[in-house]
Amino acid sequence: MTEMLVLSGLGLIMGLVLILPFSVRWIEEELEAFLLIMGCLAVTISGLWSRHLVGEALTEPIKISCAVLVFGFVFRFLRDKIRNGVEAMARRMGLGLFLFILVVGLGVLSSMITAIIAALVLVEVITGLQMEKDKERALVILACYSIGLGAVLTPVGEPLSTIATAKLAGPPYQADFFFLARLLWPWVTAGIALMGLLAAGYVGPRVKLSESLTQDKPEETRTIVMRTGKVYAFVAALVLLGRGFAPLVDRYLLALPASLLYWVNMISAVLDNATLAAAEISPKMPLATIEYLLLGLLVSGGMLIPGNIPNIIAANKLGIQSRDWAKFAVPLGLALMTLFFIFLELASA
């Protein structure tokens, strides 16, 4: 197959991956299977199948899947204790300090307990707070931004960090468990602290349970196991997509300036940022470009519900509509994107 046919085929697959999950409902609902098929097609067109790649696709999702499974059962055991303790802790600390600790704490812990479990804890706490819906929606969004930022620090935090670490594990970076933490911690720490400070300002009056955001019924064992399976399939699909898209990335994305990639990645507001990470990251990129790329994905991923896993979980369980989410999250994300960009440019000057 000629190079032009390969690049055209990969371009078509990338277009389908970027557009169909957002526009076709059944694909959105079966995203993991769709991405797995697209990943297999991309590797086939690129001619990059190997025993090593198959092994990588089978083993790379294990860590994050195990974390999701274990913490899923731990969380189910603790969920009532979490909800019952929320009111007492908020009263003892003062609501403003409690909200700061909540948002910052979930952001920091998400890299170890996974973004999925952090989002489930958030849902329980929000249900226990019983504040006005508008204020609770703002708190959920701030906390999801914090979780999305913090989870990138280790490969078990979220699929994006799992894929980024896997793609950079070889030369020249030899990425280990804490590679992304060393690269991004100043930006992540600053972002989490800022979200915590903003959350502390969203103190509101107590209301009846019916007037606040409330999560749906408790999770069953089947739900936890199915979610673990979906996470495994999702990460495996991203491994294949990342390898399959390599010729396209090498030909076009490597030549783009880091600052342009940063703003281009605002499309992760409507697409899961892990999918874009799989398509874009290359070990041939300079470290500064990887830094711009990842931060653009992380920040813009919070703008709309499909952008990352914490958004999807929290919005689904608390019944937050896309329009209500965007009303607060888009201006916040644009401001944060601009702020990070200014400091990135100053740091690289």
Image: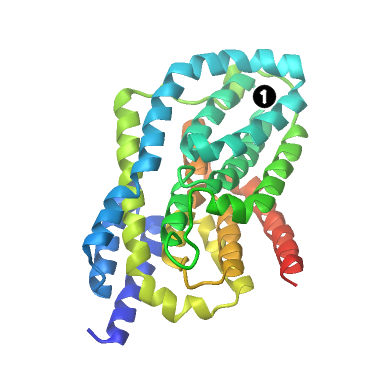
* Label 1 secondary element: loop
In the displayed structure, 244 sits above or below 220; it is below
The residue nearer to you, when weighing 125 against 132, is 125
- The image's colour scheme reads rainbow
In the displayed structure, 197 sits above or below 122; it is below
Q: Which residue is mark 1?
A: 131
Q: Residues within 10 Å of mark 1 (few under 14, many from 20)?
A: many
In the picture provided, is 301 more to the left or to the right than 44?
right
Residue 310 x/y as whole percent:
51, 41
The residue nearer to you, when weighing 88 against 214, is 88
Please give the name of the residue rendered at 43% of the width and 17% of the height, measured from the top-left corner: 77
Which quarter shows the C terminus? bottom right
Which quarter shows the N terminus? bottom left
Please give the name of the residue rendered at 69% of the width and 30% of the height, measured from the top-left corner: 101
Residue type of the residue flagged with mark 1 = Met
| Visible residue check, residue 339 | yes
Please give the name of the residue rendered at 52% of the width and 62% of the height, measured from the top-left corner: 267
| Visible residue check, residue 204 | no
The residue nearer to you, when weighing 342 against 32, is 342
The residue nearer to you, when weighing 308 against 324, is 308
In the picture provided, is 255 more to the left or to the right than 137?
left
In the displayed structure, 28 sits above or below 337; it is above
In the picture provided, is 42 more to the left or to the right than 63?
left
Q: How many marks?
A: 1
In the displayed structure, 255 sits above or below 85; it is below
Residue 78 x/y as whole percent:
48, 18
Residue 80 x/y as whole percent:
50, 15
Residue 248 x/y as whole percent:
39, 76
Please give the name of the residue rendered at 63% of the width and 21% of the height, measured from the top-left corner: 130
